[in-house]
Image: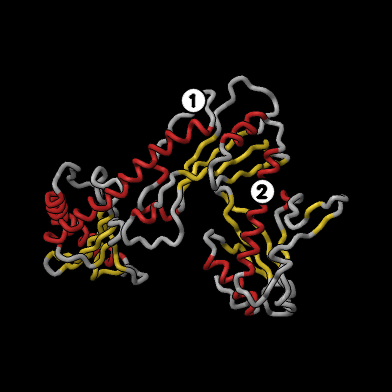
């Protein structure tokens, strides 16, 4: 995403927001308020909230780039008036805020504004949910007040039932510091998404909420959250009872995932005496390594992809010719190869030897495949 088409003052604000915000804020679309100016001055922001995104339009004026922007919220939030408070006599007042103190020369102004509005939006959603006539929801909220970082959102519409979503941060542990050498920009986190239907009638045994684990995307390379099996939600249970057991299970699994990095590293080291020094390798998570190999005059690359559950799950191999290319000029590659002898109980050196033995025949099949592919192109 380039901001070159915006006035420099506005571009500086946008670039600062995208590069300095701890949230993964995205720009969805950009457009111009005046088609004759040749400059863009408005855009839509996708702002992470409650494990989803809220979409707000930010409206600058290219003719007056020093002026503060307007922000247009979604149609479902017509009652969200963040900078208006009611006075003693029922009149609206505008308290001091990021817009009233706008300084166009400060590149952090837009970031400060967006974060201030998001905090106010969080309070707005919490107030909405607190006004819902649902005893179960009131109880759930009251038991979670001591937890930091919880976000909640109430969705409603003519064609869908009302429901309340909770995003509950789990694990009071710094996962980033547990992985030596990782360059994650954002703090890695795991959340439990809990969705309750809004029920305005008494039910003796309320139904279980919908539950889903969600993590920051970068965590997948270490710990794929979709592989975690959630414990059952028992009748009559509340979130305050459910979370401790879940967090204990997750903490153990995270520790195991970190310890498996060294297991993968030892395997990669065991490959070197068999295949030679790697051309490249993942030094942080040890999920991939590439070697140069040869069979007679046929030279090829061996890519080895290690799953997070290695050695329980075996590596996946892919061969890439250094001498054969397809019609687009790209090197010819094999299919993913995983049908070869394997046992997680073998020593790393034996694993390496068995892969080498498998490739003795497989590389001949691959060479034949490369030659046939090139012949079909002529």
Q: Residue furthest right?
A: 89
Residue 261 position in % (x across, y down)? 27, 52
Location of the C terminus (image quadrant): bottom left
Q: Which class describes the residues within 10 Å of circle 1: few (<14), some (14-19), or many (20+)? A: few
Residue 223 location in percent, x, y? 37, 48
Comes first in the chain, label 1 or label 2:
2
- 293 up-or-down from 249: above or below: below
Q: Which residue in the structure is indicated by mark 1?
A: 234
Q: Which quarter of the figure is the N terminus placed in?
A: bottom right
Q: Which residue is mark 2?
A: 123
Report the Cα–Cα distance between label 1 and label 2: 31 Å
Q: Secondary structure at mark 1?
A: loop
> With respect to residue 307, does 157 lie above or below?
above
Relative to 344, 81 lies left or right: right
Residue farthest to the front?
Answer: 88
Q: Quadrant of residue 13?
A: bottom right
Label at residue 324: none
The answer to whether residue 296 is above or below residue 79 is below
Name the residue nearer the viewer: 211 or 100. 100
- Mark 1 vs mark 2, foreground winner is 2
In the foreground, 202 or 93: 93
> Which residue is at 59% across, 64% downward?
27
Q: Is residue 47 left or right of residue 99?
A: left
């Amino acid at each position: 995403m380039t901001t070159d088409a915006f006035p420099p003052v506005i571009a500086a604000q946008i670039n600062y927001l995208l590069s300095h915000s701890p949230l993964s804020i995205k720009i969805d679309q950009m457009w111009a308020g005046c088609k004759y100016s040749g400059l863009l001055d408005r855009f839509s922001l996708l702002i992470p909230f409650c494990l989803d995104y809220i979409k707000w339009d930010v409206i600058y004026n290219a003719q007056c780039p020093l002026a503060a922007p307007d922000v247009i919220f979604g149609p479902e939030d017509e009652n969200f008036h963040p900078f208006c408070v009611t006075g003693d006599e029922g009149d609206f007042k505008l308290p001091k805020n990021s817009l009233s103190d706008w300084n166009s020369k400060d590149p952090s102004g837009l970031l400060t504004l967006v974060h201030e509005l998001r905090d106010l939006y969080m309070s707005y959603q919490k107030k909405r949910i607190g006004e819902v006539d649902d005893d179960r929801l009131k109880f759930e909220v009251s038991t979670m007040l001591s937890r930091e970082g919880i976000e909640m959102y109430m969705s409603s519409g003519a064609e869908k039932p009302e429901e309340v979503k909770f995003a509950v941060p789990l694990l009071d542990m710094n996962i980033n510091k547990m992985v030596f050498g990782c360059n994650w920009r954002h703090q890695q986190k795991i959340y439990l998404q809990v969705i309750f239907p809004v029920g305005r009638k008494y039910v003796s045994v309320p139904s279980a909420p919908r539950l889903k684990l969600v993590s920051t995307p970068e965590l997948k390379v270490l710990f794929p959250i979709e592989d975690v099996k959630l414990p059952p939600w028992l009748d009559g249970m509340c979130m305050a009872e459910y979370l401790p057991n879940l967090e204990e299970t997750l903490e153990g699994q995270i520790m195991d995932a970190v310890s498996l990095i060294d297991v993968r590293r030892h395997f990669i080291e065991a490959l070197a005496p068999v295949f030679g020094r790697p051309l490249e390798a993942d030094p942080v998570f040890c999920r991939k390594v590439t070697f140069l190999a040869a069979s007679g005059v046929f030279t090829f690359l061996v890519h080895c992809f290690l799953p997070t559950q290695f050695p329980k799950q075996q590596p996946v191999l892919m061969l890439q010719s250094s001498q054969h290319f397809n019609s687009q000029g790209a090197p010819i590659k094999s299919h993913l190869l995983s049908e070869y002898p394997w046992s997680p109980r073998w020593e790393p050196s034996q694993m390496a030897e068995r892969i080498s033995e498998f490739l003795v025949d497989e590389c001949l099949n691959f060479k034949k495949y490369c030659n046939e592919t090139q012949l079909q192109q002529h």
